[in-house]
Amino acid sequence: VRLLVETGSYDKALEFLAPPHHFRKWEGLGNIHSTYVDAHLLRGIDLLEAGDPLQGIRDFQAALEYPENLETAPPYEGAREAEIYYWLGRAFEAAGKKAEAMDFYRKSASAPRSGGRPALDFFRASSLRKLGRPQEARKLFVHLLEQGREKLASLKKGTSLDFFAKFGKKESPGQKKARALYLMGLGAWGLGDLETAIQSFKKALNANPGHVWARWALMEAEKD
């Protein structure tokens, strides 16, 4: 299923993730719910960019759900609400519903922070910017850039603690490197340093070609 998402086959992936298919926690599938969220968000983004924000909203709302057949409960420390609410804000804004959009940007900006998901700060910061709070947004972008550089440096030294252990799975050196570069890219992108952002996203994809969000970010940054 993950491979379908990585290759952009979101419809097919979501067919596999829907009932009557059932996924057991112990089947070694990694975080199947994260794959479900990725598929809905990425399909929703495609719909939004194709000029169909109302259909996009349906996907973004679905990304907030925890279907019983996936046997996953909302994590105690919060999940990806900051990211999902940001995209709901974008979709409602594109649909001309400014008040609803602002509500979702506020929800995104105030969503619980999780140490295991630092990239979510990019969406918090993007929401803060939409809310007219650029200084607060800048602090988060700077922190993302510094965090990515710090993790990349520690990986190069071979002294890195398992920064990504909170994801509940062990990752290859390439995956860890890609995550660090992705954080750097997000921070640089938010700060307007497109050259650093694009190079960071390209390097992240070289380290882990399956990093769907680095691919999305690269495509978007190259449009700016």
Image (cartoon, rainbow, N blue to C red):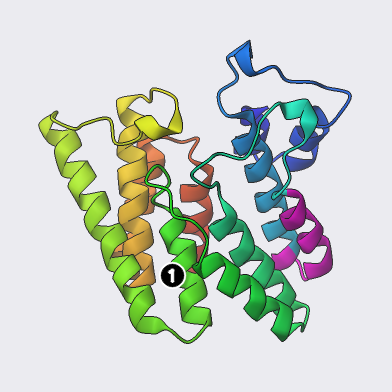
Name the residue located 46 percent from the left edge and 49 percent from the top edge. 214
Label 1 element class:
helix
Please state the horizontal and vertical placement of residue 136, each as a whole percent of the image.
Answer: 36, 77
Q: Is residue 49 magenta?
A: yes
Classify residue 137 by image quadrant.
bottom left
Does 138 sit above or below residue 70? below
Residue that label 1 marks:
125
Classify residue 49 by image quadrant.
bottom right
Please state the horizontal and vertical placement of residue 176, each as a whole percent of the image.
Answer: 33, 34
* Dot 1 amino acid type: Ala
Does 179 sit above or below residue 29? below
Name the residue located 72 percent from the left edge and 66 percent from the top edge. 48
Name the residue located 39 percent from the left edge and 22 percent from the top edge. 170
Outermost residue to the front? 76
Residue 158 seen in the current view: yes
Left or right of 86, for residue 49: right
Residue 198 seen in the current view: no
Q: Which residues are magenta?
A: 48-62
Left or right of 121, for residue 151: left
